Image (cartoon, helix red, strand yellow):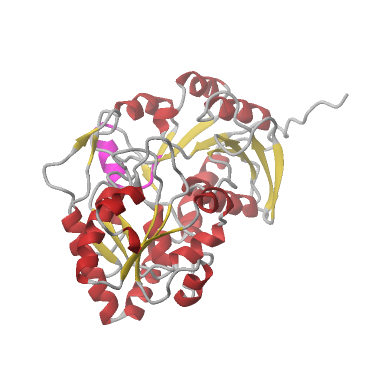
Amino acid sequence: MDKRRDLRIILHGDAIFSQSGYAVELTWLIKRLLKEGFAVAQATKAGLSTHWIDYKLDEGVLRMYPSIDDPHGSDTLFYGARHFNAHLAISMIDIWVMQPQFLQQLKQLGVKYWAYMPIDSDPVAPGVLKNLPFLDKIITFSTFGQKTLAKHGFASEMIYEGVDTDELVPRDKIEARKKYGIPTDNFYWGMIAANKENPPRKGWQEALEAFKLFYEKHPEAAIFLQTQQIALGNFPIMEYATHLKINHRIFALDQLFSSIMGTRDDIVWMLNCFDGLLHPSQTEGFGLTPIEAASCGVPAVVNGSHSQPELVIEGVTGVVAKPKEGHKRWTNSGSYWLPADPNAIYEGMEKVYSMLKENPKKVAFDCRKHVKETFNIDKIFSERWLPLLENLQDKLPPQLTPLVETPKI
């Protein structure tokens, strides 16, 4: 007997071809939904404008709706859901940016609304809390998020972000470094992160300060960095590296290539350039890059804030560095961020360095094993997402309304 697949789903977030971290995760989910036979659309908040399109993928056709007036796509989600006759809308976005009037209209339309969302502070930011009552289901990225929401009286599902372990695979490091024209004999710390504010949320300053300490002990060390998402008022990475007198050990791709020309395959090649990853974020609802790196066999040093301790197995796939004691940062969102401690990051770098010098093949194997067991997108989709969707579908009557097409003249 064929499985029912008449549940119509619209997902909301960055356009799947926009190359952001959320866009990548949405792409992996959407492809699997299409392959399962669901009718799927996307309400985009970035990457598409002026008109909807039918975007062809190997797994099927994705209806994509463009951004309209709201830069975060609240209006696009409502109008797209209405046009697509969606039964379920799923946002993958910071929920505090959503405009309540469109969420209310979505509810009046009879569309179930789930949010697959980060919780990246403790306490939960007030802007997040005010929109939670509009949700039919809260799905968080981490156990940190789930536990923190529970403190405020909100129950939630927890589903980790997953990665495609067939796409993110170890490749030859020498070949990878030659591809980007960087010296092949350095010990590379890598960093792939946004740079959209100052103080930098992703920990650029702390990473450079920790690297300076590491470089003083290991003159073969260098940093290879890539930042796609930049904004006015961002942290001056190279200027600070010059101030620290380590700029000659910083390797970066041309910004035009990083922001516009680079492909998803380039990310895989860049990760394979690294010996170790630096991820000293002040706040994370999850942190996809350390998992992507681990899938390529690369260990990470992460800041021990919020969800990040869940990303590595201490001393096996990386190190969790204790945040800077007594330096919680109260933000405009009404919650705390936890800056990394450069000294703790440096100590973590030394531990990872020793692990790699002792047995690099074991580290790479353990990293891949951890991701395959815990963060494999195929496993997460089949064991967590599919049962939730089928349970909702079973509550809907068969013979559901067909897609509304544009009237013919």
Q: Nearer the viewer, residue 395 or 104?
A: 104
x and y, in percent, of residue 92 in the image: 47, 40
Q: Is residue 320 visible?
A: no
Query: What range of the chain is rendered magenta?
Result: 139-153
Q: Is residue 96 magenta?
A: no
x and y, in percent, of residue 196 in the image: 39, 40
Q: Residue furthest right?
A: 409
Residue at image position (52%, 23%) is: 107
Q: Is residue 365 visible?
A: yes
x and y, in percent, of residue 288 in the image: 40, 53
Compared to 293, does 95 lie above or below?
above
What is the quadrant of the N terminus in the image?
Answer: bottom right
Q: Residue furthest left?
A: 326
Residue at image position (52%, 28%) is: 71
Compared to 140, does 254 lie above or below?
below
Q: Nearer the viewer, residue 139 or 162?
A: 162
Residue 399 in which image quadrant: top right
Q: Main secondary structure of the magenta part?
A: helix
Compared to 311, does 111 lie above or below?
above
Please indicate whether residue 382 sits to the left or right of residue 184 in the image.
right
Q: Is residue 148 magenta?
A: yes
Compared to 187, does 1 lie above or below?
above
Please indicate whether residue 199 sits to the left or right of residue 158 in the image.
left
Q: Nearer the viewer, residue 105 or 341?
A: 341
x and y, in percent, of residue 258 in the image: 51, 52
Residue at image position (50%, 30%) is: 72
Q: Nearer the viewer, residue 104 or 186?
A: 186
Residue at image position (37%, 74%) is: 364
